[in-house]
Every structure is written in structure tokens, then in C-alpha cells.
Image: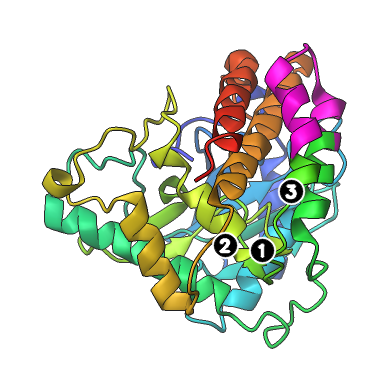
Amino acid sequence: MSFEPGPVRAAHRFDEAALERYLARHVSGFDGPLSVQQFGGGQSNPTFFLTAGGKRYVMRKKPPGQLLKSAHQVDREYRIMKALAATDVPVPRMHVLCEDESIVGTAFYVMDYLDGRIFRDPQLPDVAPAERAAIYDSMNDVLARLHKVNFAGVGLGDFGKPGNYFDRQVSRWITQYRAAQTDQIPEMEKLIEWMPAHIPTDDSVSIAHGDYRLENTIFHPTEPRMIAVLDWELSTIGHPLADLAYNCMGYHVQNPRQGGLVGVDHAATGIPSEEEYVATYCRRVGRAKIENWSFYLSFSVFRLASIAQGVYKRGLDGNASSENAAKFGNTCQFLAEHAWRLANARL
């Protein structure tokens, strides 16, 4: 989400008075009057900045309209962040989950607003080399910490099905793509055939964030230290290498909107190479090596292609949470081409 909020967009307006009455009953210390603004971005779940009584909150809600099955699960976001509050994985404080759609039209939750920095560009152009290195190391460290969490011990034993993660995920994103498909994309058809036949035998199990990247985190205002991980909608009990590969996509795919790390001078910038980043993660979690790295990378880009197609379809249907959703029309094909290239890279 954009760091600076603005007016609530017309498609996402709701009864603010009803929200204020609800929060007064369910959030300890809440004191109106309530002021509501909307953050930009947030392709999946519209996100709002709330102020009341000198306190600041963030609300995430499902978008309006007909939604794809198993998408926009704000209840899962709320549950996992509330559970992780008892661990060393940094998350905002959760206040309330409301599944009563009569309040603001869809389910929502409210959490603390955190002062900090959100980095859009993975090349960190306005940061000194030493701080860049520290920022990437903090991101690496938090990912390793997440994957070492005893998920059953924090009440997440039923948060997903342990094992066979990629079998289920490949099937899920094929299904999601088919549900949102608008055109024939040859590389997606090739991937749909290739993916199920090349799933690695490594069946490690951990919490998987599902969208772990620099932009989905908050760093301390002045220190190169991560203070929160956001956007847990795709989280589950999954495979740690799915998160790691997704986190490393920028080394291979130059996103036309958000940039990437393709061709970066690592020595000059302080940004670690992919090999250094992966090796550091492996040391932290006690993993000796990673085989079939090209599969994990290809799957990550394939899944993102399916998500982009869903955003585009919602834009066509008029219920996407970003005014720019229709611009995603070429994104699926762009990502599918990269995913197919990675599938054949033998990394």
C-alpha cells in the first residue's frame, strides 16, 4: 500500500458512522470521532488509515463484488498475525476481526498503524550501501525466523495441511488462472503441463507467508531493522522454499512497475547477490543445500502470473481494489514468459 493515504475511492465507500460505533464497542481505548482515508495500491484487499482520539489504526477489508473462491481471506491475515505476536516475527498489534458484513459491507480487521519506512524499489536508491546490506540482511533474518516458528505451538496447527504443498499449490493456481482466464497465453499452457510433472521431492513444512518481499514489510524509521511483516492473505502451512524463491524473484524478473535486481552491481550497492542471500538463509535455518532451485523460482513467477490475471479480470468486472487493475492485462503474459524461461534454466 502507498505510505501516504488519500480520500476513500468511490467504489470503496462505506458507512463510516457504523464503523465508528462498532469500533467503540470492540476496540479497547477507542475514542471517536473517526476519520477515514484510503491507502493506494492494495490490489487484493482495500486498506484504510483510521484516526480517532489521537490514535492511528489500519483497517483491511475484503473488496466489494463477486470474489474468487478462497481469495481475500482477511480472517486468515488477522489470525496469523495475532498468533505470531507471541513469536520473534515482527507483526502489528491486532485489535479486532469483524465478519459481520452489515458493518462496512464486507469482512474486515483493524490493527495498529506503525510509523516506519516502506521500500518500493528493491534497489533502495536513496539508501547508503552499508544500510542496504543491513536491510537485506534483516529481511533474510525475519524470513528465517518465520520458517523456524513452531506453528502448532502458537495455535496454527490447523492453519493449513502439512506436506504436499506444491501439489496443492500448483493445482490451486491452475484453477485460479482458469477461473480468471480471458485470453490464450501459450507459456501459461506450457507451464500448466510442466509444473505438476516437475515437483521436487523435498517436502519441508513451515509457515509460508506467500507474498514475502521488501514492499510488504515496514522498517524502523531510522534503523535498518524490520519492524513488521504485512499482507498475510496468502499465508498457510506450506513449504519454506516457496517463500525464499518468491523473495528472490527480483534477481531474475525485472518488474516494469517496481523494478528488480537484474544486473545490479552487488559490490557497489551493498545488495547481496542471490547466491549470498540464499546461502545466508540456509545457514540461518540449518539447510545444507537446495536442489531444483529453478522449479521453485519458476513456480513463484507462475503463481504471480495467475494472481495478476485475477487482478486483471476483477478490473474488467469493475470490482478490483485498485484503479490501475486494468493495466494488468499484459502482466500475466509477461510473467508467464519469464516463468517458462526459468523452468528451463536448470538452476
Q: Where is residue 82 in the image (x, y as percent from the top left)?
A: 63, 73
Report the side of 114 relative to 321 (left or right).
left
Label 3 – label 1 distance at C-alpha: 41 Å
Residue for point 29% across, 50% down: 273
The residue to which callout 3 is attached is: 18
Labelled pair 3, 1 in contact (Cβ < 8 Å): no
Please give the range of residues in magenta: 175-194
Front label number (2 vs 1): 1
Labelled pair 2, 3 in contact (Cβ < 8 Å): no
Task: Residue lying at the far bottom in this picture: please name it.
Answer: 153
Of pointers 2 and 1, the one earlier in the residue sequence: 2
Q: Nearer the viewer, residue 163 or 313?
A: 163
Residue for point 57% across, 84% down: 86
The residue to which callout 1 is attached is: 239
Q: Is residue 127 visible?
A: no
Task: Residue lying at the far top in this picture: please name it.
Answer: 183
Q: The residue under label 3 is which amino acid type?
A: Ala
Q: Which of 258 and 43 is in front in this view?
A: 258
Q: What element carries label 2?
A: strand
Label 2 – label 3 distance at C-alpha: 18 Å
Residue for point 31% across, 59% down: 276
Q: What element carries label 1?
A: loop
Q: The residue under label 2 is which amino acid type?
A: Met
Label 2 – label 1 distance at C-alpha: 27 Å
Residue 42 sits in quarter:
top right
Front label number (3 vs 1): 1
Q: Nearer the viewer, residue 231 or 26?
A: 231
